[in-house]
Amino acid sequence: MADKRRFILAHAEARRRAIECIQRAPDGHVVEVREPTRNLEQNALLWVLLTAFAEQLDWPVNGRMVKMSAEDWKDVLSAAFRREQNRVAMGVDGGMVILGLRTSKMGKREFGEFLEFVQSVAVERGVSLEPDEVSA
């Protein structure tokens, strides 16, 4: 048997093959069943949205209103999506480090909810979204 097999449980035959593979697997092998991860279209849409925030909004950072990068907006928006219930750790040199959500750990459904949240924040904050670029 191959070291690693992957089955997408999309129909009865795929489920049958997965069960068969599990039955043949040697002791000690591991089985994981999980929600699919986000798709390329969702990921591309996120970066379109984050870039719109980065280009259009100033945000308070260290007491000054500045333009933030798309990556910084991802941190701010993912924290807000979790209702800003992230943990704060002391940095090595005394600063603060936000221990936040990793969008790469989101399943496809949750990532879709995150995209809807980001789009609603964009509307609330007056971030202009081009309809041709924002459809996934």
Image: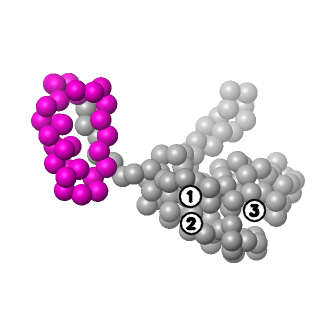
In the image, what residue occupies the spot 19% across and 56% down?
A: 12
- Can you identify the residue that label 2 sits on? 136
Compute the Cα span from label 3 to label 1.
17 Å
Image quarter for residue 53?
A: bottom right
Instruction: Compare marks 3 and 1 and give the one earlier in the sequence.
Output: 1
| Residue sitting farthest toward the front | 13
In the image, what residue occupies the spot 50% across and 64% down?
A: 113
The reply to whether residue 131 is visible in this rendering is yes
- Can you identify the residue that label 3 sits on? 52
Image quarter for residue 85?
A: bottom right
Q: Is residue 30 left or right of residue 75?
A: left
The three-letter code of the residue at mark 3 reads Ala
Q: Is residue 27 left or right of residue 35?
A: left
The picture places residue 73, in percent across and down from the top left corner, at 70, 54
- Can you identify the residue that label 1 sits on? 41
Q: Is residue 118 above or below residue 10?
A: below
Along the line of sight, the residue nearer the viewer: 58 or 71: 71
Along the line of sight, the residue nearer the viewer: 80 or 107: 107
Tell me, yes or no, whether the two marked residues, 2 and 1, touch with CB atoms within 8 Å. yes
* Within-10-Å neighbours for mark 1: few <14, some 14–19, many 20+: few
The three-letter code of the residue at mark 2 reads Ala
The picture places residue 102, in percent across and down from the top left corner, at 54, 45
The picture places residue 3, in percent across and down from the top left corner, at 30, 26
Q: Quadrant of the N terminus?
A: top left
The picture places residue 134, in percent across and down from the top left corner, at 65, 68
Compute the Cα span from label 2 to label 3.
16 Å
In the image, what residue occupies the spot 86% across and 57% down?
A: 65
Q: Give the magenta range.
A: 1-29
Image quarter for residue 129?
A: bottom right
Q: Quadrant of the C terminus?
A: bottom right
